[in-house]
Image (cartoon, rainbow, N blue to C red):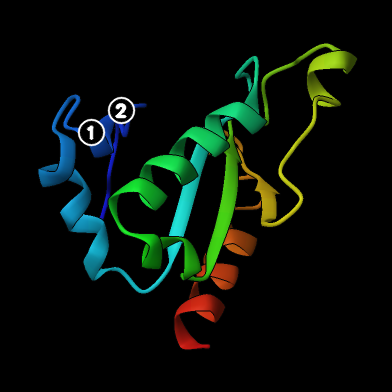
Amino acid sequence: ADIPGLIKGAADGKGLGSQFLKHIERTKILVFLIDSSSNNILEDYRILRNELEKHNKVLNTLPSILLLSKSDIEMSKEHINQPLPVEIDIIRISSLNRKNLEKSIKKIAYLIAD
């Protein structure tokens, strides 16, 4: 399920709310995609996890991976070294130069098969 635009408050009915979140219940794994140029990747990730938890606790038990997109964009050292979640595998990807796309596909396939 592709769940673009999952926002803070979705589990409480904000945006498309629980209609939106019900699509996730049919998935076998979770692939989080966060823009690596975000000012707070850790907070963005925690918001997503929190909304899943509030909707259905089982969702946060699914195998998951975090893909940080746009890794080709030049960023400051402080931005690159910002805190990241430690409880999840993270792969920095770039659709532009195809960086780590094959690695991501293999990891996702492994999670599905496992």
Residue hosting label 1: 12
**Above/below status of 111 relative to 64:** below
The relative height of residue 71 versus residue 24 in the rendered view (above or below) is above
Q: Is residue 39 above or below residue 36?
A: above
Q: Label 1: few (<14), some or many (≥20) within 10 Å?
A: few
The x, y position of residue 71, in whole percent, is 67, 31
* Residue 37: quarter of image: top right
Which image quarter is the N terminus in? bottom left
Residue drawn where x is 17% and y is 55% of the image: 22
Residue at 57% over, 72% down: 106
Q: Position of residue 20 (x, y in %)?
A: 16, 43
Circles 1 and 2, Cβ within 8 Å, touching? The answer is yes
Residue drawn at x 45%, y 42% is 50
Name the residue that disc number 2 marks.
Answer: 9
* Amino acid type indicated by mark 1: Asp
Marks 1 and 2 sit apart, C-alpha to C-alpha, by: 5 Å
Q: Secondary structure at mark 1?
A: helix
The residue lying toward the viewer, choosing from 19 and 55, is 55
